[in-house]
Image: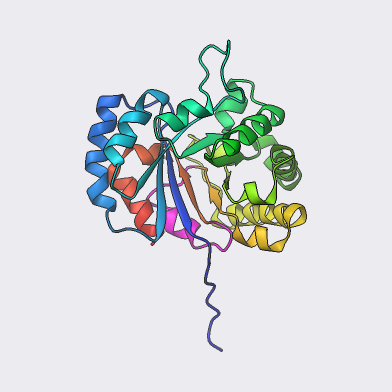
């Protein structure tokens, strides 16, 4: 019998999360290098989520290319006495299109909860930003066999009050916390299984059509060596890339794997 070929109708999204790296000067140089490397690679969306001070430079340098720019966090209020925070209007005014919300480092180091993630997400959507919503389990949860319960709960709480129409501007990034910055990576089978769990939750909340449509990335140490195997899985529609997104050649290789 001939083998079955699975054709995914969802578009791949390869997004770089620079975290606290790159100055504006370095950002301009990086994008000058990256843009010609990814030119014509149009079978996926390419996003760089950069530090706040880099956004305007990144957007300026990426103009006219196939690279989209995003921020790494957003506050849920329009303005006010929130020292160190950034509003959705501020992101939009410097031409950010995307924003990461709920990254494990925000949850772990800066006190983010599912409640604040939900508030930030709804504010971002209300201002026309596309959201990369991060969910994922700690190592002890994986070892205890409760990954499905933890991730399902996060998805439900983080999307509370989000309409089916708004969901069209949400990408979910599954990032096992134990695989971020550690060099460890979930096997393609583990990653696909949990991304499938997320898709099943979306189906229960919004229906099968929404579940079939939503883009789910893998975000735990995806790099140029393992990207092809991860992206070949049915439920993995892209990557939220950390360290490899700071290397033009490595990032380009991941984009190429999504072609």
Image location (x, y in percent) of residue 136: 63, 40
- Residue 139 falls in which quadrant of the image? top right
- Residue pictured at 44% horizontal, 44% vertical: 15
Estimate the x, y position of residue 101 in percent, counting from the top left: 57, 34
Residue 26 % position (x, y): 26, 28
Left or right of 204 on screen, residue 229:
left
Q: Please tell me whether residue 176 is drawn above or below residue 26 in the rendered image.
A: below
Residue 229 located within the stretch drawn in magenta: yes
Residue 177, visible in the rendered structure: no
Magenta stretch containing residue 248, yes or no? no
Q: Residue at x 26, y 44 (%)?
A: 34
| Residue at figure coordinates x 40%, y 35% from the top left | 95
Furthest-bottom residue in this view: 1
Residue at 48% over, 34% down: 181
User: Toward the viewer: 139 or 208?
Assistant: 208
Image quarter hosting the C terminus? bottom left
Classify residue 180 as left or right of residue 102. Answer: left
Identify the main secondary structure in magenta: loop
Of 95 and 132, nearer the camera is 95
Looking at the image, how many numbered discs can be counted on the residues? 0
Q: How is the image coloured?
A: rainbow
Q: Position of residue 245 (x, y in %)?
A: 37, 40
Image position of 208 (left or right of 129): right
Q: Is residue 196 above or below residue 153?
A: below
Q: Is residue 253 above or below residue 220?
A: below
- Residue 214 seen in render: yes
* Quarter of the view holding residue 27: top left
The N terminus sits in image quarter:
bottom right
What segment carries the magenta color? Answer: 221-236
């Amino acid at each position: 019998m001939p083998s079955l070929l699975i054709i995914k109708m969802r578009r791949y999204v390869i997004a770089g999360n620079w975290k606290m790296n790159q100055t504006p000067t370095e950002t301009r140089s990086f994008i000058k290098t990256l843009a010609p490397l990814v030119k014509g690679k149009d079978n996926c969306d390419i996003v760089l989520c950069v530090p706040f001070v880099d956004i305007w430079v990144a957007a300026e340098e990426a103009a006219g290319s196939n690279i989209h720019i995003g921020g790494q966090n957003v506050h849920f209020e329009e303005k006010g006495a929130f020292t160190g925070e950034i509003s959705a209007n501020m992101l939009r005014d410097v031409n950010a299109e995307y924003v990461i919300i709920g990254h494990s480092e925000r949850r772990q180091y800066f006190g983010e909860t599912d409640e604040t993630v939900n508030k930030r997400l709804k504010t971002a959507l209300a201002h026309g930003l596309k959201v990369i919503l991060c969910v994922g389990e700690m190592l002890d949860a994986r070892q205890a066999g409760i990954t499905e319960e933890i991730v399902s709960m996060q998805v439900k709480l983080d999307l509370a009050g989000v309409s089916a129409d708004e969901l069209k501007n949400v990408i979910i990034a599954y990032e096992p916390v134990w695989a971020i910055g550690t060099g460890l990576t979930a096997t393609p089978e583990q990653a696909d299984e949990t991304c499938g769990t997320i898709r099943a939750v979306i189906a229960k909340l919004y229906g099968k059509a929404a579940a079939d449509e939503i883009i789910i990335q893998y975000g735990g140490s995806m790099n140029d060596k393992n990207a092809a195997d991860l992206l070949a899985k049915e439920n993995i529609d892209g990557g939220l890339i950390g360290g490899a997104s700071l290397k033009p050649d490595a990032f380009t290789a991941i984009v190429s794997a999504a072609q």
